[in-house]
Amino acid sequence: MNVRLITSFGFAVLRLSTPLVFAALSAAICEKAGLFNMAAESMMLWGALVGVMISGVTHSALLGFLAAVAAGALTGMLIWVATVKGKADLMLAQIAINLASSGGTIFLLFVLTGEKSNSAVAIKSLALPKITIPGVASIPVVGQILSGHNILTYGAVAAAIILSIFVFRSGTGHHIRAVGENAHAAESVGISVPKIYFLTWTIAGALGGIGGAFMSMGYLTSFTKDMVAGRGYIGLCASSMVGGSPIGAMFCALIFGVADAVSNQLQLTNAPADLVLMMPYIVTIVVLVGLSVAKHQRAALRAKLKG
């Protein structure tokens, strides 16, 4: 029984961490460019809705996935247009997009299907495939935890590695980090800051769209109202914890995945339901407060040593 609990819990942690990883990576690439991405929530919402719609219409999970990526990327491009071309305040623009997306996705769902909260009845969406890892699946306990996940769970690990290589090893990645360090200095040596911002928001949007595709084509096979449920903000927190490191953001997202899995387990007990549902967000607040305290303590220590 204990072994079964361990394997089911471990499996749940990886499954629940998947959208958080993509949200964290979306925030991480922006952080490296000196941007603050609090719109991963919108990117994921539009990716989730469009993925289901296109999958249902075309009867192709692949086309649904590609459409979700495109929807997320377009959301990122919209932020770029509003803030770079339109000179809108970055924070206000993202707040507006998040609020508009929350209602806009439901409005579009209603216009296209007549449903206001769930697409399951009107659209028969396809699910992205699950992968059994040869050799690993037969290993006791470990195989039951690591094998049999949705393809995007493994894709999240691959995305973190690829993004890390891109940011730290490629010429474009060096430009992104240069702009993040000092946009004016980067521009003085010929780096186009608007182009870097465009690329960064597009990549961030695509990653958010993939996270949304997992929510509606992996975790579920339908779109429901506000199904992202704050995961974009938790991903932002995970990225901030490690200064935008893609690999670090992935592991931090796993921490929040553990909190989410514990919350799910507690729902099977007599614990107060509302308190249980709050757990992932309570953990987020505690972590942020802890990081802030640690940061101030380090700053005070450095000041004391200098004095």
Image (tube, rainbow, N blue to C red):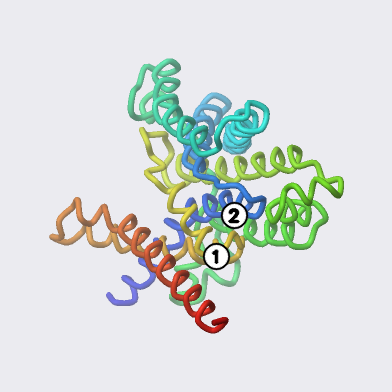
Q: Residue at x 60, y 46 (%)?
A: 207
Q: Which picture quadrant has residue 204?
A: top right
Could you tell me which quadrant the N terminus lies in? bottom left
Crowding around mark 2 (Cα neighbors within 10 Å: few <14, some 14 to 19, many 20+) is: many
Q: How far apart are the two marked residues, 1 and 2, measured between alpha carbons? A: 9 Å
Q: Secondary structure at mark 2?
A: helix
Residue at the far front in the pictured view: 307
Could you tell me which quadrant the C terminus lies in? bottom right
Kind of residue at disc 2: Ala
Q: Residue at x 43, y 67 (%)?
A: 291
Please name the residue that numbered disc 2 is placed on.
28
Please name the residue that numbered disc 1 is placed on.
242
Can see residue 67? no
Kind of residue at disc 1: Val
Q: Secondary structure at mark 1?
A: loop
| Left or right of 214, for residue 257 | left
Tell me whether the residue at label 1 lies in contact with that at label 2, contact meaning CB atoms closer than 8 angstroms.
yes
Q: Residue at x 54, y 24 (%)?
A: 57
Percent x, y for residue 205? Answer: 60, 40
Q: Residue at x 69, y 56 (%)?
A: 181
Check the image and report above or below for 232 versus 164.
Answer: above
